[in-house]
Amino acid sequence: MSDTARLSASADGLPLFADGMHLTEQELLACQNIARAMPERYSRARANLAGHRSSLIKGRGMEFAEVRHYQQGDDVRTIDWRVTARTGKTHTKLFVEERERPILLLIDLSQSLYFGSSLLLQSVQAGHLATTLGWNAINHGDRLGALIACESEHLELKPRSRRQGILQLISGLRRVHENQLNHVGSGQRDPDHILRACQRLQRIAKPGSLVWIVTDGNHFSPQCIAPLTELKRHCDVGAYLITDPLRQGTLPLPHNFSLPVRDGNEDLVLTRHSYQAWLDIQLRQQRDFIAMMQKLRVRTQLIDAGAPLAHQLELLR
């Protein structure tokens, strides 16, 4: 089946192999098809690592950059004999050196993401997005690592190349997600787990890395600004905010309703009257996260858990 056919096969419902609640190996492997359909983005690495990203450093590589006069110490194999013959002076070719870029994902699987009103739990959409970004990274020859954070644990996955990187991400996502799903509303809760994740990320991210933050934004406190500021000094950072139609106020509701909702570890019954107050809190938390990212000059894109990720490809630039 072609990539287009695979994407359209689930156009009117759940993504391929997904049930909306769990994360399975099959559905995360299928995210490779979404990654192949992603709009191309071009970036330049800052770190001194070899691979497939164009760097500003000219040296031995695959892409021709320019010709200059031969200098003592230049590799004789790069002499441009045509220019040399035409000018009467020895010239050598320079190429854009290619660099492998470490890609790090900070994946927030806090219990607040185990919420879904339409198609998927927000945590499932976060898993789909993280895996799609991971597939895109290894498709470009980059090294892929991750820090999966929740109230009960932080799972660090060191950057690895090719299939090793994506397979360890899929395995880690499935394990942490299933454990969180089985303990929603119970167990010990660390209110500062995202702060600690940001501090840890700032320590482990090597200069020149590209860092993607995948979160619902609920647990990013003002204290997170300091480690993220340090991270931003030597890494490129982007953010994706996972939302839900009920939390966005875009879900059509009847005039009178009584809607039981589990929000993190809290059981609620939303009515027409109480829903607006609850919605105001949800929107304020989203605005606070976006404002924090704007302060850090980090671009934030909203990803809706009420629609398949394949329908939101333009947001993945």
Image: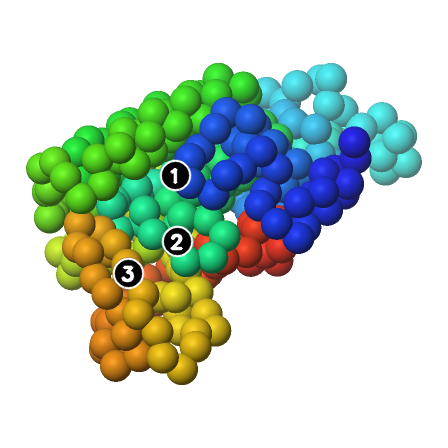
In the rendered structure, find residue 127 and report the number of the disc placed on it: none
Q: Which residue is mark 3?
A: 260
Q: Amino acid at mark 2?
A: Gly
**Circle 1: residue type:** Leu
Residue on which the image places disc 1: 105
- The location of residue 114, given as percent across then percent down, is 32, 47
Per the model, the C-alpha gap separating discs 3 and 2 is 12 Å
State the residue in front, 226 or 278.
278
Residue 8 shows in the view: yes
Residue beneath disc 2: 116
Quadrant hosting residue 243: bottom left
Left or right of 75? Residue 126 is left
For the residues labelled 1 and 3, the Cα–Cα distance comes to 33 Å
- For label 2, the crowd category at 10 Å Cα-Cα, with few meaning under 14, some 14 to 19 and many 20 or more, is many
Q: Is residue 298 above or below residue 251?
A: above
Q: Indicate the amino acid at tag 3.
A: Pro
